[in-house]
Image (tube, rainbow, N blue to C red):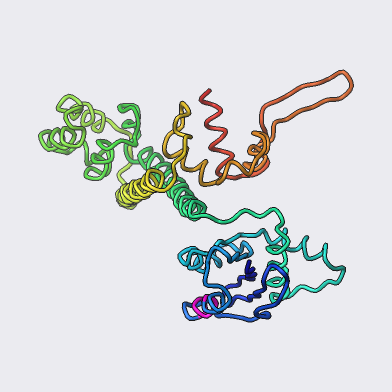
């Protein structure tokens, strides 16, 4: 078996290659973080083994710096392991008391870990898709938070320009209301709107749900509104609604890609659980990854940043609701799901 240890950095990677007997095949060498560097590494691997199944490659987990190299190695059919830097550090200390820490030394240490067959799990295509899914679900989460802030701004601006409107509709954040506010930016503009134009606008956007009666209701409320006609605020409202539409379109596009990955690349029974939607299920899978890594449900909760509270003192013994120990996305999602039950 050929063992390849790689210490990953932003602009270069330090590598070390030996066989499972400890014979050094290529002493520590450095490759640039480029296609040429990747090919140089692969040629060295090919020169000592023409069978990819007899090669193990270990990389330290270094956030996004390892993504491109990892993808290259997987495309070449090489069995690859992602190793926690803390794991590498502890393993190095177990071998020597010397405080030697260099990139080349780390590459050698990673190779030794592969040779010793410590508890490592190979990085599969499913893991690669999980990383892709994690990027998309976190990106969607950020977009949704951004949109929520804009919706708060809409509520604030409507309270200035046409405060009575909020009491006339189930919510301000619906297509027909946004269409109204995009064209008639204040109570004064709504009050002077032509009834036919206002009716057609509401009918078209609401697909017939709102018509002439609603148009009259809005216009009459606008005529007696206490709202202020402030052009600067009206312009801000118009642009804010435009941004919300853009973000909603982006979120829809992200969700389409998430669904594609879930359907084509990740086959999980999680959706058979009552109450788990595509969005929630995808985020849970993306954040947890391989469920087999955890022996008990409690370990999953701890990983998510949720801790069941137990208190025992003398004769007092009680259990309380889970407490958040981190601000992770997964913690909020699991808490949301628990609230469904």
* Nearest to the observer: residue 75 or residue 97: 75
Left or right, 256 with respect to 126, comes to left
Q: Quadrant of residue 324?
A: top right
x and y percent of residue 196 in the render?
A: 10, 34
What is the count of numbered marks? 0
Q: Quadrant of the N terminus?
A: bottom right
Q: Please indicate, yes or no, whether residue 238 appears anywhere in the rendered image.
A: yes
* Nearest to the observer: residue 179 or residue 332: 332
Left or right, 22 with respect to 210, comes to right
Q: Residue at x 69, y 53 (%)?
A: 119
Q: Residue at x 64, y 33 (%)?
A: 297
Q: Which residues are magenta?
A: 37-42
Left or right, 214 with respect to 164, comes to left
Q: Residue at x 69, y 75 (%)?
A: 103
Q: Is residue 337 magenta?
A: no
Q: Residue at x 58, y 65 (%)?
A: 54
Q: Is residue 279 above or below residue 19?
A: above
x and y percent of residue 286 in the render?
A: 51, 46
Q: Residue furthest right?
A: 314
Q: Residue furthest left?
A: 196
Q: Quadrant of residue 99?
A: bottom right
* Nearest to the observer: residue 306 or residue 53: 53
Left or right, 215 with respect to 267, comes to left
x and y percent of residue 317 in the render?
A: 81, 21
């Amino acid at each position: 078996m050929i063992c390849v240890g790689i210490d990953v950095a932003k602009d270069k990677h330090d590598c070390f290659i030996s066989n499972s007997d400890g014979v050094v095949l290529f002493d520590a060498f450095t490759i640039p973080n480029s296609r040429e560097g990747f090919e140089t590494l692969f040629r060295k691997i090919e020169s000592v083994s023409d069978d990819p199944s007899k090669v193990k490659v270990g990389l330290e987990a270094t956030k996004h710096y390892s993504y491109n190299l990892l993808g290259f190695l997987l495309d070449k059919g090489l069995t690859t392991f992602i190793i926690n830097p803390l794991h590498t550090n502890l393993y190095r200390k177990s071998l020597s008391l010397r405080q030697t820490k260099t990139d080349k030394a780390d590459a050698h240490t990673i190779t030794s870990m592969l040779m010793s067959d410590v508890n490592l799990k190979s990085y599969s295509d499913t893991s690669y898709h999980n990383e892709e899914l994690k990027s998309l679900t976190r990106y969607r989460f950020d977009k949704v938070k951004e949109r929520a802030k804009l919706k708060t701004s809409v509520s604030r601006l409507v309270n200035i320009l046409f405060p009575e409107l909020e009491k006339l509709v189930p919510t301000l954040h619906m297509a027909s209301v946004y269409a109204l506010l995009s064209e008639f930016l204040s109570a004064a503009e709504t009050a002077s709107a032509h009834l036919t134009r206002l009716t057609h606008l509401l009918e078209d956007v609401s697909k017939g749900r709102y018509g002439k009666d609603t148009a009259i209701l809005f216009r009459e409320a606008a005529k007696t509104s206490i709202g202020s006609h402030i052009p600067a605020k009206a312009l801000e409202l118009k642009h804010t609604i435009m941004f919300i539409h853009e973000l909603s379109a982006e979120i829809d596009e992200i969700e389409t890609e998430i669904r594609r990955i879930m359907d084509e690349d990740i086959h999980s029974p999680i959706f058979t659980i009552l109450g788990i939607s595509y969005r929630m299920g995808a985020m849970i899978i993306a954040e947890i990854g391989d469920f087999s890594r955890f022996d008990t449900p409690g370990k999953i909760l701890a990983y998510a940043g949720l801790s069941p509270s137990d208190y025992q003192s003398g004769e007092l013994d009680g259990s309380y609701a889970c407490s958040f120990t981190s601000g992770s996305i997964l913690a909020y999602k699991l808490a949301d799901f628990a609230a469904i039950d």
